[in-house]
Protein backbone atom coordinates (compact mmCIF):
# COMPACT_ATOMS: atom_id res chain seq x y z
CA UNK A 1 0.00 0.00 0.00
CA UNK A 2 1.03 3.57 -0.59
CA UNK A 3 0.38 6.84 1.24
CA UNK A 4 0.36 10.43 0.09
CA UNK A 5 2.44 12.84 2.15
CA UNK A 6 2.16 16.49 1.31
CA UNK A 7 3.11 19.95 2.43
CA UNK A 8 2.32 23.60 1.84
CA UNK A 9 5.50 25.48 2.73
CA UNK A 10 7.55 28.48 1.68
CA UNK A 11 8.67 28.35 -1.96
CA UNK A 12 12.37 27.82 -1.21
CA UNK A 13 11.73 24.32 0.15
CA UNK A 14 10.21 22.75 -2.96
CA UNK A 15 13.40 21.89 -4.81
CA UNK A 16 15.27 21.05 -1.59
CA UNK A 17 12.61 18.51 -0.63
CA UNK A 18 12.46 17.02 -4.13
CA UNK A 19 16.23 16.51 -4.24
CA UNK A 20 16.52 15.03 -0.74
CA UNK A 21 13.31 13.04 -0.31
CA UNK A 22 13.56 11.32 -3.69
CA UNK A 23 16.66 9.52 -2.32
CA UNK A 24 14.83 7.97 0.67
CA UNK A 25 13.98 4.27 0.52
CA UNK A 26 10.30 3.69 -0.16
CA UNK A 27 9.66 6.98 -1.96
CA UNK A 28 8.05 6.32 -5.31
CA UNK A 29 7.23 9.85 -6.47
CA UNK A 30 8.00 13.44 -5.45
CA UNK A 31 6.41 16.45 -7.13
CA UNK A 32 6.17 20.10 -6.26
CA UNK A 33 4.43 23.11 -7.75
CA UNK A 34 4.58 26.74 -6.77
CA UNK A 35 1.77 29.14 -6.11
CA UNK A 36 0.77 32.02 -3.88
CA UNK A 37 -0.82 32.06 -0.46
CA UNK A 38 -2.24 34.99 1.46
CA UNK A 39 -2.68 33.44 4.89
CA UNK A 40 0.19 31.15 5.81
CA UNK A 41 3.48 33.01 5.50
CA UNK A 42 4.90 36.15 7.03
CA UNK A 43 7.01 37.03 4.01
CA UNK A 44 4.81 38.60 1.32
CA UNK A 45 6.60 39.10 -1.99
CA UNK A 46 3.43 40.16 -3.83
CA UNK A 47 1.55 42.63 -1.66
CA UNK A 48 -0.65 40.48 0.52
CA UNK A 49 0.54 37.19 -1.03
CA UNK A 50 3.63 35.06 -0.43
CA UNK A 51 5.11 32.38 -2.65
CA UNK A 52 4.56 28.76 -1.66
CA UNK A 53 5.54 25.25 -2.69
CA UNK A 54 2.89 22.58 -2.77
CA UNK A 55 4.69 19.25 -2.31
CA UNK A 56 3.27 15.79 -3.02
CA UNK A 57 5.08 12.58 -2.13
CA UNK A 58 3.86 9.04 -2.81
CA UNK A 59 5.63 6.56 -0.55
CA UNK A 60 5.38 2.97 0.55
CA UNK A 61 3.33 2.74 3.73
CA UNK A 62 6.19 0.87 5.41
CA UNK A 63 8.36 4.02 5.20
CA UNK A 64 5.71 6.67 5.84
CA UNK A 65 7.00 7.80 9.25
CA UNK A 66 10.59 8.24 8.06
CA UNK A 67 9.46 10.19 4.99
CA UNK A 68 7.07 12.37 7.02
CA UNK A 69 9.75 13.15 9.60
CA UNK A 70 12.32 13.98 6.92
CA UNK A 71 9.85 16.30 5.15
CA UNK A 72 9.04 18.06 8.42
CA UNK A 73 12.75 18.46 9.19
CA UNK A 74 13.79 19.65 5.71
CA UNK A 75 11.11 22.35 5.77
CA UNK A 76 12.39 23.48 9.20
CA UNK A 77 8.88 23.42 10.62
CA UNK A 78 10.21 22.59 14.09
CA UNK A 79 11.66 26.13 14.25
CA UNK A 80 9.89 28.27 11.65
CA UNK A 81 6.34 27.00 12.15
CA UNK A 82 5.35 28.40 8.75
CA UNK A 83 3.74 25.60 6.80
CA UNK A 84 1.69 22.46 7.05
CA UNK A 85 2.53 18.81 6.43
CA UNK A 86 -0.11 16.11 6.08
CA UNK A 87 -0.40 12.39 5.40
CA UNK A 88 -3.27 10.45 3.86
CA UNK A 89 -4.64 7.10 4.84
CA UNK A 90 -3.51 4.18 2.69
CA UNK A 91 -4.15 4.64 -1.02
CA UNK A 92 -5.80 1.88 -2.99
CA UNK A 93 -4.75 1.16 -6.54
CA UNK A 94 -7.54 0.97 -9.09
CA UNK A 95 -7.23 -1.78 -11.66
CA UNK A 96 -10.01 -1.05 -14.10
Image (cartoon, rainbow, N blue to C red):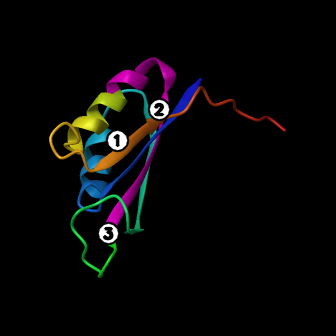
> Image quadrant of residue 35?
bottom left
Q: Residue furthest top?
A: 62
Dot placed on the residue nearer the N-terminal end, 3 or 1: 1
Residue 59's tag is: 2
Image mark count: 3
| Disc 1 target residue | 22
| Disc 3 target residue | 51
Q: Which quarter of the rendering shows the C terminus?
A: top right
The answer to whether residue 84 is magenta is no
* Residue sitting at x 59%, y 23%: 1
Residue 5, x across and y down, in percent: 45, 37
Residue 20, x across and y down, in percent: 25, 42
Residue 6, x across and y down, in percent: 44, 43
Residue interval drawn in magenta: 51-66
* Residue sitting at x 42%, y 27%: 26
Q: Secondary structure at mark 2?
A: strand
Q: Pick the residue in front: 14 or 72.
A: 72
**Label 1 neighbourhood size at 10 Å, few (<14), some (14-19), many (20+)?**
some
Q: Residue furthest right?
A: 96
Label 1 vs label 2: CA separation?
10 Å
Q: Secondary structure at mark 1?
A: loop
Amino acid sequence: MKVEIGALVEKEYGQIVKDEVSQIAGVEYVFFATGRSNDLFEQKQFGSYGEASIITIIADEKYKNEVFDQLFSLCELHTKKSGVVFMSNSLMRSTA
